[in-house]
Structure formats: C-alpha cells, structure tokens
Image (cartoon, grey):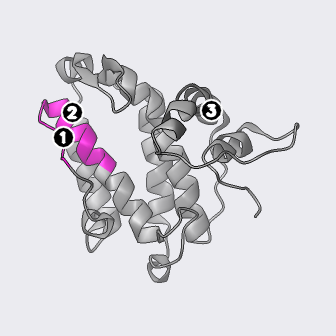
C-alpha cells in the first residue's frame, strides 16, 4: 500500500501549485537562485525519479533543467507525472530495494514514507515565492522533522544542504523543520 503520508504530502503540494497565480512563476523563492517555476520543476522532476525507481529503470545521470521539467503548464505537468507514478506504485514496485544517494539501501515504500520531507519543505518554498500562506499538517511535519534530524547531518556533509538556522526554544515543528533546511519563517 502506498504510504498515506506520501499521498497527503502530494495533495498539499498540489494545492499550493494549483493556487499559484500565473503572474508569480518568476517570483524568487527561498531556494537561492531559484524562482517559483524552478521549485515546481524540481518537485516534478522528483516524481520522475520516483517513477524510474518504481519501474525499475535507471535514474537520470544529471538533474534536468527545472523549467523544462515544469513545462508550459506546471499544474498539468504535475498532474500527469503524479498519475504516472501512482499507477506504478503496486506491491512489487513498493517492495523493490533501492539505493539512496547517501549509501542507504531501503525499499521504495520505506523511501516514500520519508519523502514527505522533500514535498513539505518545497511546498513551503513555493508558497513563499507565490504569496501564499501554508500551514503544513502537524503530523506530517512531525514525521518529516524526525527524518530531517536523521539525515540532515549526512546531507550537509555531502554538500546537499546549507547551514541550519537557529530557532527559539518554543518554536513549533514547522518552524524547526524549515530551519533544518536553512529557511527562516518570518524573515
């Protein structure tokens, strides 16, 4: 069975993507050097990686151009990519063992249980870039924060993440999650 948190995180991203005003695709995002369209393309390209893993195909050797990945209509491109992925996520694909970038080998299902981390952080990035306010579902954020705490040190060591931001002792989990990835809520 496809992990529920993964599907819910897809829904959250899609809601922000679909609500993006057409004149905001070129707005700067919290990801240095990226615009809203780049964030959308990056997340859509992530679905292509999931699709390749589910189908047992080799992964692309290099990242695509994020704007090309988003296409002319990022919402339509996302929905088509999502539909392709979901049709492939049967029991055999979910049980397939995959190798992650940091050397960990797990099943596709186990990876998808952790994947909301990527979706949630970039949902917030897209919302920030496009003038939307998003409060992420607390249980999804809590699980993503645990994943982030586990993998962020390795990601930083590999040069995949920048420095973590400091947060107040009473910060909520969403603020803490975003801080792990160098984002600052409210500034």
Q: Earlier in the sequence, mark 1 or mark 2?
A: 2
Residue 59 shows which numbered tag? 1
Residue 140, placed above or below residue 187:
above
Reading the image, the residue beneath label 2 is 53
Name the residue rendered at 47%, 83% in the picture: 23
- The magenta region covers 46-61
Res 66 seen here: yes
**Image location (x, y in percent) of residue 135:** 67, 50
Q: Nearer the viewer, mark 1 or mark 3?
A: 1
Quadrant housing residue 96: top left
Name the residue rendered at 65%, 54% in the picture: 183
| Magenta portion: prevailing SS class | helix
| Most distant residue in the bottom direction | 23
Q: Earlier in the sequence, mark 1 or mark 3?
A: 1
* Quadrant into which the C terminus falls: bottom right
Q: Mark 1–mark 2 contact, CB under 8 Å? A: yes
The residue closer to the viewer here, 185 or 127, is: 185
Quadrant housing residue 85: top left
Q: Earlier in the sequence, mark 2 or mark 3?
A: 2
Q: Residues within 10 Å of mark 1 (few under 14, many from 20)?
A: few
**Image location (x, y in percent) of residue 80:** 23, 54
Reading the image, the residue beneath label 3 is 145
């Amino acid at each position: 069975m496809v992990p529920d948190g993964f599907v819910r995180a897809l829904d959250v991203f899609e809601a922000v993507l679909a609500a993006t005003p057409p004149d905001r695709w070129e707005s700067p995002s919290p990801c240095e050097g990226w615009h809203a369209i780049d964030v959308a393309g990056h997340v859509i390209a992530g679905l292509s990686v999931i699709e390749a893993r589910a189908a047992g195909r080799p992964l692309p050797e290099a990242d695509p151009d994020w704007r090309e990945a988003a296409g002319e209509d990022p919402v339509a491109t996302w929905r088509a990519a999502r539909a392709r992925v979901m049709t492939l996520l049967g029991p055999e694909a979910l049980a397939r063992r995959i190798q992650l970038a940091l050397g960990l080998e797990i099943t596709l299902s186990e990876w998808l249980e952790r994947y909301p981390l990527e979706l949630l952080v970039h949902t917030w990035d897209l919302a920030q870039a496009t003038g939307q306010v998003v409060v992420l579902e607390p249980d999804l954020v809590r699980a993503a924060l645990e994943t982030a705490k586990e993998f962020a040190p390795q990601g930083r060591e590999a040069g995949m993440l920048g420095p973590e931001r400091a947060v107040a002792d009473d910060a909520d989990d969403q603020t803490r999650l975003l801080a792990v990835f160098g984002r600052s809520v409210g500034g």
